[in-house]
Image (cartoon, rainbow, N blue to C red):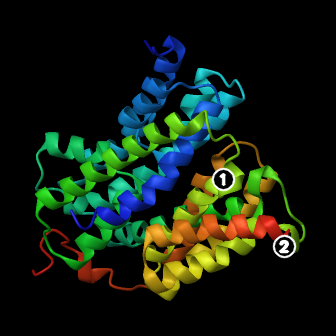
Amino acid sequence: MISADPTMLLAIALMALTTYIPRFLPLLVLSRRALHPLAESWLSYVPAAVLAALLGPALFVPEGQVHFSLADNPHFWAAIPCFIVALTTRNMFYTVLTGMGSISLLRLIF
Amino acid sequence: MARGLPIVLGYFPIGFAFGILAVNAGMNTLEVTLMSIFVFAGSAQLIAVGLIGSQAGLATIAVTTFLVNLRHLLMSAALAPYLGHLSRLQQGLFSFQLTDETFAVHSMDFKTEAAPPRARFFATNVLAHLAWILSSFTGAWAGSLLTDLKAWGFDYALPAMFIALLVLHIGEWRKAVVALLSISLSTVLYSVTEGHGYIIITTLVAATIGITLGKKKVDARRSPVNPGE
């Protein structure tokens, strides 16, 4: 019988809590009153800003390593077909498959 | 249902990759599945697996998860005006399944339609959650067989998903400018600072610069629940 380690269960519980609080708190506070237009405008930029913030290091500092030359960084080059596929198909699945295929191909070349 | 399908397909390689990585970091199939049921946060779970693999303490795991998930604070706030008609219980359930991906679908949906039926957006959430649980379970099961993630490009599933989500969110030039600023700033901050603070700092700075780029449709969405007014 497979069983879970108590420390791991505690880690999962802590992660569940620290994930849920930021997801629920704003909804609880902000859903019954209107936001200031400036705040609303600011919030409209957040998704693009946060996704780009996660993406930057993944493309330019992959696996924690700074690549001073783009030529030896397949993580950057694989992003180009991904962007093209994402822009033309607007489909997450095709984009992820393109990414996985491109990086595999580039690793054969580099 | 149809709106959730792209998420299901997008989650599969990422959940699968998470399962494989988690097993290779020392977690078992039950622990992987429980984490996907109760946490349901792709990037936080992937980052946590890295920490577990490097023997990090509970406090580090909890604080890092919180920082990585702080962006949902902003996403939840962005959707809040559209969800005032839900009961508290429904709001609680909705936020439990609020991820980058479900947010992308919902914000698009709420923008194009005044009041999408709640059955539809809950179906999207549940479908996405089930896909995440099933794909990470499958990955954990396969984890003992497949140890070289790079051979199949599974390590690139997450960046590719961020690209797809980003493209879906850039509808106009101001957002493209904000995204470019954000990519540059986060890369620099990530290189010169420790930890995950770069995510929240970059987001706050880039979004603030965004509002200085000029006004657009600010007044058109004063009453998002009923934009016909």
- Disc 1 crowd rating (10 Å Cα; few below 14, some 14-19, many 20+) is many
| Residue at x 32%, y 52% (from the top left corner) | B128
Rendered location of residue A18, percent (x, y): 45, 34
How crowded pointer 2 is (Cα within 10 Å; few <14, some 14-19, many 20+) is rated as few
Location of mark 2 (residue) = A70
Q: Considering the numbered disc 1 on the image, is that residue within a helix, a strand or a loop? A: helix
Quadrant of the image containing the C terminus of chain B:
bottom left
Chain to which mark 2 belongs = A
| Amino acid type, residue under disc 1 in the picture | Tyr
- For this rendering, which residue is in front, B64 or B138? B138
> Does B84 sit left or right of B213 as displayed?
left
Q: Residue at image x 83%, y 71%?
A: A109
Residue B140: mark in rendering: none
Q: x and y percent of residue A79 in the render?
A: 66, 73
For the point 50% across and 70% down, the residue is B164
Q: Is residue B172 above or below residue B201?
A: below
Taking the image as shown, residue B16 lies to the left or right of residue A19, namely right
Q: Report if residue B207 is visible in the image.
A: no
